[in-house]
Image (cartoon, rainbow, N blue to C red):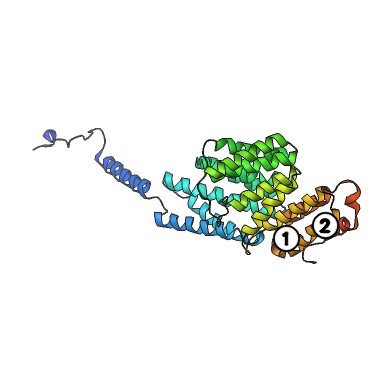
Amino acid sequence: MNESTAISEPGEDRLVPPQLRDHLDAARHSTDRTLAQGSLAGGQLDLLEERLLLMRQEYLHTPPAMMLAQLLLELAEVEGHSTERQTTSVQIRLTEMTAVLATLIADSLMKLGDDRRSRGWYETARHAAEESGNQELRARVRAQAAMLPYYYGPLNAAVSLSREARLMTKHRPSATAAFAAAAEARALAQQGNAADAEARIREARTIYDRMPPSPDDDAFGFPWRRFLLYMSGAYTALGQGSRARKVQEEALALYPARTGIDPALLRLEAAICLAHERSATEACQLAAQTYLQVPEEHRTSILGVRARRVIEELPGVNGRTRAAMELRELLELPRGSM
C-alpha cells in the first residue's frame, strides 16, 4: 500500500502533524492526572483538619499569647498548600481552615487588647469565609467578629455584624444562628435598646431549643454555658439584676476548673450588677478579687476593659470612693507587677 492510499485512523485530523498529535495527547493525559490528584492527598487533608479540631479544643484553656504562636504555624502550613495546585474541593476545605484559623487569631488578639490587628485578622477571616462559599461559616465569622466592637466599640458595629449573621442563618436552627441572635441581643442591650434586645433574647432561646446539641470542648461550638454568658451580658446591661444572677450562677456551675476567661467575665458582670444596685464597695471588691484570681497568662486586656466597666457603672460620686480608687489603681499596674 503506497502513501497515497494509506487509511487514516478513525477520527484522526489529517491537518494536525503527527508530532503535535503526540504532544497534545501527552499534555491532555498529564492535565487529567493533575486535575484528578492535586498535590495534597485526602489523608493529609484529614490530618490537617484533625489538628485544627484539636487546636479549637485547646483554645478554650490555652493562654492567648501562647495560642497565637501555634495558630500562626498551622496557618503557614495551610497557606503553603493553598498556593499549590489543588482540586476545587480540596481548595475549598483549605479556605475554610484559613477562615477558622484567622478567626481564632483575631480572637486571641482581641483578648490581648490589640484591637487594630484583631480587626485586620477578622477582615481576613471574613474574606476567606466569603471565598469558601460556606454560608454557615460566613455567618459564624461575622458573629465572632461582633465581639471586638462589643468590648472595644463602636457598639453599632457589634449590632450590625451580629444582625447580618442572624439574617444569614434565618430559618436554620444551628449553633451559629443561636450565637448570632444572642450576640445581637447583648449588643442591643448595651446600647440601651431594651425592646429589640428582649426580642432577640426570645429568638435566641427559641433557636437554641431547636438546634442540634453543641460540643462543650470546641471554640466554634455554642454550648449552654456559653449561651448563658451572653444572656448574662444582656440582662446585666438591661439592669435586670435578678435574671442576670440566675444565669451567672447556672453558667459558673457548668464551667470546668480548667478553662479560659469566661468565668471571670461572668463574675465581673455580677460586679456590674452590684454597681447598678449602688453596692459600690462590694462591686469594686468583687471586681478586684476576680481580676487577681485569674492566672497572669490569662489576665489580658479584655478583663481590664470589663473591670473598668464596673467603675464606669457606679452611679453618682461612687466612682470616687476608696474601693473604686483601689480598683482603678490595680488595673493601672503594669503586667507582672502583682
At 63% from the left and 43% from the top, the residue drawn is 182
Residue 306 percent coordinates (x, y): 75, 52
206 with respect to 20 (left or right):
right
Residue 125 percent coordinates (x, y): 59, 46
What amino acid is found at the position of numbered circle 1 in the picture?
A: Arg
Which mark's residue is nearer the viewer, 1 or 2?
2
What amino acid is found at the position of numbered circle 2 in the picture?
A: Glu
Please, is residue 118 above or below residue 169 in the view?
A: below
Q: Secondary structure at mark 1?
A: loop
Residue sitting nearer the eye, 233 or 239: 239
Which dot marks residue 299? Answer: 1
47 with respect to 311 (left or right):
left
Please, is residue 286 above or below residue 139 in the view?
A: below
Residue sitting nearer the eye, 36 or 145: 145
Q: Secondary structure at mark 2?
A: helix
Task: Pick whichever of labels 1 and 2 is earlier in the sequence.
Answer: 2
Image quadrant in which the N terminus is located: top left
Residue 26 percent coordinates (x, y): 30, 46
Image quadrant in which the C terminus is located: bottom right
Residue sitting nearer the eye, 103 or 214: 214
Disc 1 crowd rating (10 Å Cα; few below 14, some 14-19, many 20+) is many
250 with respect to 36 (left or right):
right
Q: Which residue is mark 2?
A: 282
Q: Is residue 138 visible?
A: yes
- Residue extending farthest to the left is 1
**Residue 60 occupies quadrant:** bottom right
Residue 173 percent coordinates (x, y): 52, 41
Please, is residue 205 above or below residue 279 in the view?
A: above
**Residue 176 occupies quadrant:** top right
Please report contact status of discs 1 and 2: CB closer than 8 Å, yes or no: no
